[in-house]
Image (cartoon, rainbow, N blue to C red):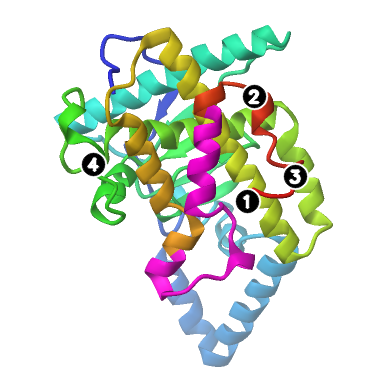
Amino acid sequence: MRWKGRRESNQVEDLRGNSGTGLGGGVAPLALMAIFSRLGVKGTIVVVILGLIVWKVFGINPLAMLGGQSATQQVSQPYQESAEDAQTRQMVSVVLADTEDTWQQIFASAGKQYQKPMLVLFRNGVQSGCGAAQSAMGPFYCPADQKVYIDLSFFQQMRQQMGISGDQQNSAENPNSNQAGDFAEAYVIAHEVGHHVQNLLGISSQVQQARQQASETQGNALSVRQELQADCYAGVWAHHNQQRTQFLQAGDVEEAMDAAHKIGDDYLQKQARGYVVPDSFTHGTSQQRARWFNTGLNTGDLNQCDTFNIPQL
């Protein structure tokens, strides 16, 4: 994938120098130990039970009540960025800028105004508008603050744990052999931006409303349709970006297809436990994910991404 020499987005927020710590400044671990030692075993058990009830019923963190601060706080520390990290950050910024240019054009042609999302880089954990999140969750979009969150180590996991290597022959602009191919990485970013587009179009809120009135199985089915639409939107971005910049190289599309295949629900469940439970799918099968990305890529038409009004995905 060709990406060097193009505009970088100014919508990137780098929080990699921050790290979540176990307890906030309100109550230190030694102070908690002193409190519990005074209460004794029975008293401690009562306090813990009451605290869990408060947390469950009222959604209030009992540690925050004790110290007036959140139990998880962000501690800022200098972040030493390696040359490979710097190049990956630059690539992410260029891809984000490409999504901005593409979606601004598409929205304008429909008489709408595109609002750019922020992209937040973090390590290990982060506090988002949708709550606390850990790197293990993978990249995600939070509609509450309209931000995409990603720990760049996910790209290494794509290669090392998922086996998504990409076409290294055409990765001269991203020679990091520890990561997935650059277009596979771009597909991940474009998918999350696709969720932002859904949010701007009011689709996300409609799905959320429908899920509140649905059973768990029905809610999962709605989630699958929403995720597949975001895959299609990622393909729409790639279609228009190719027309603008000619950024694709031989093997890039296959890279994205490999990524789509290996993050399909059926593939992941088979890898994890040897069998699949279709009613538990939340993102779609490997075949579905590849199909809908290709639909967007081949047509470039937002109207072809309506995954909610067709019986067969």
The residue tagged with tag 3: helix, strand or loop? helix
Find out whether the residues at labels 4 and 3 contact each other: C-beta distance under 8 Å. Answer: no
Q: Which stretch appears magenta?
A: 269-296
Q: Position of residue 30 (x, y in %)?
A: 39, 69
The residue tagged with tag 2: helix, strand or loop? helix
N-terminal label among 2 and 3: 3
**Camera-nearest residue between 31 and 59:** 59
What residue is at 20 percent from the left and 22 percent from the top? 173
The residue that disc 2 covers is: 302
Check if residue 197 falls in the magenta segment. no
The residue that disc 1 covers is: 224
N-terminal label among 4 and 1: 4
The residue that disc 3 covers is: 207
Cα–Cα gap, marks 4 and 1: 27 Å
Is residue 135 in view from this perspective? no
Drawn side of residue 13 relative to residue 289, left or right = left
The residue tagged with tag 1: helix, strand or loop? helix
Q: What is the residue that sits farthest to the bottom in this orientation?
A: 42
Q: Amino acid at mark 3?
A: Val
